[in-house]
Image (spheres, grey):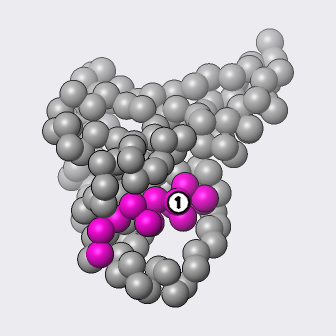
Amino acid sequence: MVGRPAELAHVPAPAKPVFASGLSPESVGGPVDVVIDTVGGPVLRDALPLVRPRGRVALVGYTAGREFTVDLADFLLADVSLLPVNLMTRGKEVAADAEVLLAELRTGALTLEMERHGIEEFAEAAERLRTGEAIGKVVLDLDLG
């Protein structure tokens, strides 16, 4: 997995995440079967060579950028599947699961990582989003009163 820190006690050790700043063959222990990328951009490009032939990369988000450049010859030779994960187009398919998750949010059984920034910290918040350093969602508090 490639992404931001999170609660990972339930994830088996071989599936622990490698954070964007630590991408290298050494940091992942050699070729991996699957990468789940939640940040996109150059992080996605850098993650592709870490996947074994016929492995998969699931792209879930793009907080580090909406575009990435890849050498097509290397990508074709690597034989890695790039899979976009877009639940926004699957409303009816995920409605029941969404209801369960919303109920868990209401009761506090499920929490979401969030960074809160005041309006005076707008530039810092935007930079954290741009670089992919933000943890969870970034909220800009516009409380002017």
Magenta stretch mostly in which secondary structure?
helix
Residue 87 in view in this figure: no
- Where is residue 131? Give x, y as percent: 66, 43
In the image as oriented, which residue stretches furthest toward the front?
26
Residue type beneath disc 1: Asp
Q: Which residues are magenta?
A: 40-53
Residue at image position (31%, 28%) is 7
Q: Is residue 38 visible?
A: yes
Judge left or right: residue 31 versus residue 75. left
- The spot of residue 6 in percent (x, y) is 37, 31
Q: Is residue 138 highlighted in magenta?
A: no
116 to 43, vertically: above or below? above
Depicted 80 relative to depicted 90: above or below: below
**Between 106 and 75, which is closer to the camera in this rendering?**
75
Q: Nearer the viewer, residue 46 or 93?
A: 46
Tell how many labels.
1
| Category of crowding for the residue at label 1, using alpha-carbon neighbours closer than 10 angstroms: few (below 14), some (14–19), many (at least 20) | some
Q: Is residue 141 left or right of residue 55?
A: right
Tell me which corner region of the image, top left, top right, bottom left or bottom right, holds residue 141.
top right
Where residue 105 appears, x then y in whole percent? 32, 29
Q: Quadrant of residue 32?
A: bottom left
- Pointer 1: what residue? 46
Q: Residue at x 58, y 79 (%)?
A: 71
Coordinates of residue 145 in the picture (x, y in percent) = 80, 12
- SS for callout 1: helix
Q: Residue at x 63, y 72 (%)?
A: 69
The reply, left or right, for residue 115 in relation to residue 35 is right
- Report the side of 24 relative to 98 (left or right): right
Viewer-proximal residue, 76 or 104?
Answer: 76
Q: Residue at 21% x, 27% y: name it.
A: 9
- In this rendering, the answer to whether 82 lies above or below 130 is below
Residue 51 is one of the magenta-drawn residues = yes
